[in-house]
Amino acid sequence: MVNIGKICNNCNCELKKYDKVYRTIRVKGGVKMKVKIQRYQCPKCKHIYRELPEDLYPHKQYESEIIDGVVEGLIDSSTLGFEDYPCEMTMKRWRKEHEESEDE
Ligand SMILES: [Zn+2]
């Protein structure tokens, strides 16, 4: 893997490290864990970018594994082993978002 640095989508400038933020995510079993997210800023347009861990979806409080399971229909409220499954409303929203993104 070659590290070519982070580039701004707007102006193709190389991003500079900005700060670090912590996000709490919920994993299987209802365990909460904190993940560190490095933020970058474009020196030109000042846009802030976040470097998300690969297994994390932005703005989602659940593991991507669970989200994918819901979207693919593998997990629902009756699935064993997911005691802390997202509520039905949340799962519906994910499925809807997924369908909408496929339409594009
Ligand atoms: Zn920029």
Image (spheres, rainbow, N blue to C red):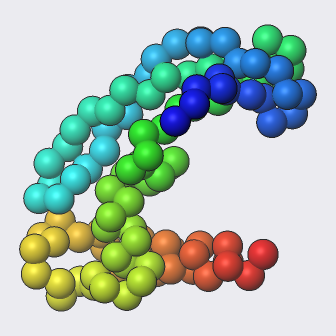
At a point 11% along the width and 59% down the height, the residue shown is 29
Can residue 101 be seen at all in this image of the molecule? yes
75 vs 7, left or right, is left
Point out residue 64 in the picture as x, y percentages from the top left corner: 38, 60
Point out residue 3 in the picture as x, y percentages from the top left corner: 58, 26
State how many labels appear: 0
At a point 37% along the width and 26% down the height, the residue shown is 36
Vertical arrangement, residue 7 with respect to residue 83, above or below = above
At a point 22% along the width and 53% down the height, the residue shown is 27
Vertical arrangement, residue 86 with respect to residue 43, above or below = below
Vertical arrangement, residue 100 with respect to residue 47, above or below = below
Work out which residue is located at the far front of the displayed protein and give it: 1
At a point 85% along the width and 28% down the height, the residue shown is 12
Can residue 89 be seen at all in this image of the molecule? no
Q: Nearer the viewer, residue 25 or 49?
A: 49
Point out residue 33 in the picture as x, y percentages from the top left corner: 22, 38
Determine the image quadrant of residue 15.
Answer: top right
* Quarter in which the C terminus is drawn: bottom right
92 vs 12, left or right, is left
12 vs 81, left or right, is right
Determine the image quadrant of residue 42.
Answer: top right
Point out residue 68 in the picture as x, y percentages from the top left corner: 40, 71
Determine the image quadrant of residue 48.
Answer: top right
